[in-house]
Image (cartoon, rainbow, N blue to C red):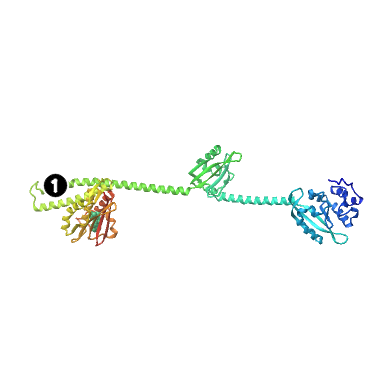
Amino acid sequence: MTMDTDNAPRSSSLADSIFPAQGEMGPLCRAKNWGETPLGPVETWPESLKAAAALVAHQGIAMNLCWGPELRQIYNDAYRTIMGDKHPAGLGAPVLVSWAEIRSEVEPLFARVMQGETVYFEDLMLRVDRHGVLEDASFTFSYSPVRIESGEVGAVLINCFETTAQVRARSVQAERDRLLAELDVERSRLSYVFNKAPFFLAVVRGPDHVFEMANDSYYQLVGHRDVIGKPVSEALPEVVAQGFIELLDGVLETGVPVVGREQAIDLQQTQGAPLERAFLDFMYIPFVEANGSRTGVIAHGVDVTAQVKARLEVERLLGDAEEARREAEQANRAKAEFLAAMSHELRTPLNAIGGYVELINMEIHGPVTEAQRDALNRVHASQRHLLTLINDILTHARLEAGRMEFDRSPVQVLPLLRDVETLIAPIASGKGIAYAIRECDPGLVLMADDERVRQIILNLVSNAVKFTDRGGTVTLACEPVGDRILLSVEDDGRGIPPEKLEAIFDPFMQVGRSLNRPEAGVGLGLAISRDLARGMWGELSVESEVGGGSTFTLSLPAA
Ligand code: ADP
């Protein structure tokens, strides 16, 4: 308490009757030299001022009486707290001087009150300077008019509570609530993610691995069993014998995570149901607390059963297909070997028949009658035909068995065609068929097995003559295309129906086959020819029109 020490206390009995003796402000007001203020000595105060000052001085609620046109302040103990460092200078001083920093805000209020109005504010925030710094403070207050003897408003009475602490507490609470709400949102988001995650996740605690958390995917995996609060061995008894508990023990003991890829696990969807196999990609990682201790294991992963089963099925099918292919190959080889052996067994006696027929024909065993010779010639013709067929079968069998060897070397095309011409010309002219080599550059050279090319061309030309009627034409041609040479045999014979164009290359396939065609082959010529062509990195193809003739084209690498 600061006392005016320069001037002796002027405590008058009148002042004593207005201001109380207790507290801080009472004695101060008693001692104050009011004569130094425009209010004048207490003895001169009008009744209205004395009454109002006494009211303020005895009130427990913070009150400040602002008197006269300058609004000089008389305030009580409770208001003194609100004043801060503005006291003691503020006592008897104009309120708008004491509170200069909020003058612009409160001056209009005082003006309204001087007009007879009462103003009231709750928790009004004002930026005030009470301790040498500006601070935000909140006040609930009323300014009410005080009428003096003349009946006019001569003063303003301020009733005031400072509510800074409450307002602050409220805003702290509001902030807390906001943060809690945010946390709640965050938590429910997290739990949504946790639950709806496409991967499964579960947390087990302690040496018994008691389930603490599990998400939807995990529940789905274990058939929606109630696992929380139960040890793994009790919640999922069927996994006990499958080694998973030992894995959990290991992770908890060593802290080393375990990773499983496509790990098979047999699970029951409901109690007593049969075990169903699932495949999991999973990871067990230790749950490490902030203090470094391991208290549990986090199990997370993906159910890859569908993918694994699909893959196993594909592998099984591929395996079956491979098995079937191997079996077919095996069967084919066995068949080819059988054919090769049979052909050989047939050829030996056939050759013997041919040999003996010739010996008889040469009359080595005595004279032969005309009728006998005729019969011998038929036997001989049949023997040759049969031998050709058997040779074809033998070649085909060897090709099928992959036993054919090719002796590839440069082959001049034109001379080869001429050789074939020499062989075929007598038959062609005998049948009244014109035969010609159309155009062939003498410089063309193939890379192939001479013998085999000859065999193919001879076969094509024989077919052309065979399936062309008297008066027709058979033409040979050759032509280089890129790094290949095309040899073509063209006829204007009966042609081949479009649906048979591929089939004629199948073994034993003959268009319009009939039993009474003794001169025809067995349908192996084209099959053999195409296999031979392919064996020399070539190809054999055909273009044909029924009634319009056929063109067979052999394509082979140029030398
Ligand atoms: P083959 O001549 O022993 O019957 P091929 O494999 O050589 O056996 O011929 C198969 C079939 O293709 C023949 O039976 C015939 O129907 C048809 N064919 C082959 N060449 C011709 C051709 N130039 N014109 C018409 N048909 C043909």
**Residue that lies at the very extreme toward the right in this rendered image:** 13
- Residue 181 image position (x, y, % from top left): 64, 51
Q: Residue at x 43, y 47 (%)?
A: 312
State ligand 1's quadrant: bottom left
Mark 1 highlights which residue?
A: 356
Residue nearer the viewer, 102 or 180 = 102
Residue nearer the viewer, 538 or 34 = 34
User: In this rendering, is residue 38 above or below 330?
Assistant: below
Q: Quadrant of residue 51?
A: bottom right
Q: Secondary structure at mark 1?
A: helix
Amino acid found under the numbered disc labelled 1 = Tyr
Q: Quadrant of residue 117?
A: bottom right
- Residue 132 image position (x, y, % from top left): 75, 48
Residue nearer the viewer, 248 or 499 = 499
Q: Is residue 228 visible?
A: yes
In the displayed structure, does residue 316 sit left or right of residue 65? left
Rendered-image quadrant of the N terminus: top right
Residue nearer the viewer, 15 or 297 = 15
